[in-house]
Image (cartoon, helix red, strand yellow):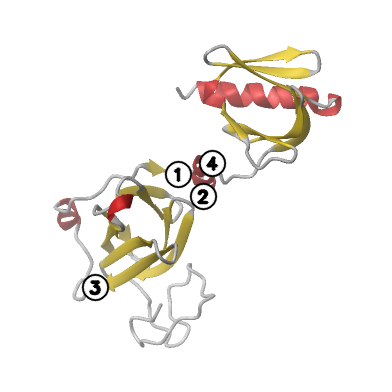
Amino acid sequence: MNCPKCGEQLPSNLSTRIKFCPICGEALFDAGKHYIIEIQCTGQRDDSDTVMMVFVDDRQLYEARLGESICFSVNAGFHVLKFRHKIRNKVISLLINANYNIRAYYNTLSGLIETNVTKVEGTERGMEPIEIAKKSITSPVMISEDGQRSFDVMLGEDDPEYEIKVTSGLQEGILKLFSERCEFVPEGQLKKEVLQYREVLEVRKKMGSIDMLCEGNVHKVYSIPKDIYNEVLAFLNNRIDAVSSRK
């Protein structure tokens, strides 16, 4: 990123809260202005069914398929955009003081997400509300109230609240309890068994084990160490009740 006044490159470790150039001292942006970012997602034709996810400041999530574009308004200042395609991520930081066009695509040869960022010249004055209203503004798929954590939960990248050594049937392994799901990983295996709390109808006590009754009369039974049994049972009941209340 470069200072719009002196043209010098800004330090890579520059705080996104700073408003003045550390080199020339001039304002980097006018906090009262708003701009438009348009992102076009392109890729291979045989990959047309997959979705490119775009996270804006870990607050808003947009989705676009091959050949589709998304358009949204942001206030002047520093913004972080994260692009995700399948398991690949790319993060870019932008100093927004004009409209921007961004071409984002998944390169099947390199296996990486690539972006081409273009500043729209002559748009530094900002956009008036009436001008923004005339644009085809894309509605976000999700808005996060608590930042990145909500998106991590959605993508399965959050940290577990508990990791417990348990037995399930004849298998020993690790049971990981998250805020929205639990995962059982048998010893010596890479494959994990994932159970979303929204699928659980009831949690029952069963001779030192917990029995999670799921839809379709399916039972998931895990033995739990005595020293943490009641705590785990209370956690699961609280989380399952919370998830059920949102249905």
- Amino acid type of the residue that numbered disc 1 sits on in the rendered structure: Ser
Q: Residue 98 appears at what percent x and percent y?
A: 27, 70
Is residue 95 rendered to the left or right of residue 42? right
Residue marked by disc 4: 153
Q: Earlier in the sequence, mark 3 or mark 2?
A: 3
- Amino acid type of the residue that numbered disc 4 sits on in the rendered structure: Val
- Nearer the observer, disc 4 or disc 3? 4
Rendered view: 181 above or below 47: above
Rendered view: 172 above or below 46: above
Rendered view: 10 above or below 209: below
Residue found 41% across the figure and 53% down from its top = 85
Front-most of residues 224 and 49: 49
Q: Secondary structure at mark 4?
A: helix
Residue marked by disc 1: 144
- Amino acid type of the residue that numbered disc 3 sits on in the rendered structure: Glu
Q: Residue 94 appears at what percent x and percent y?
A: 39, 69
Q: Which mark is residue 148?
A: 2
Q: Give the CA separation, mark 3 to mark 1.
A: 29 Å
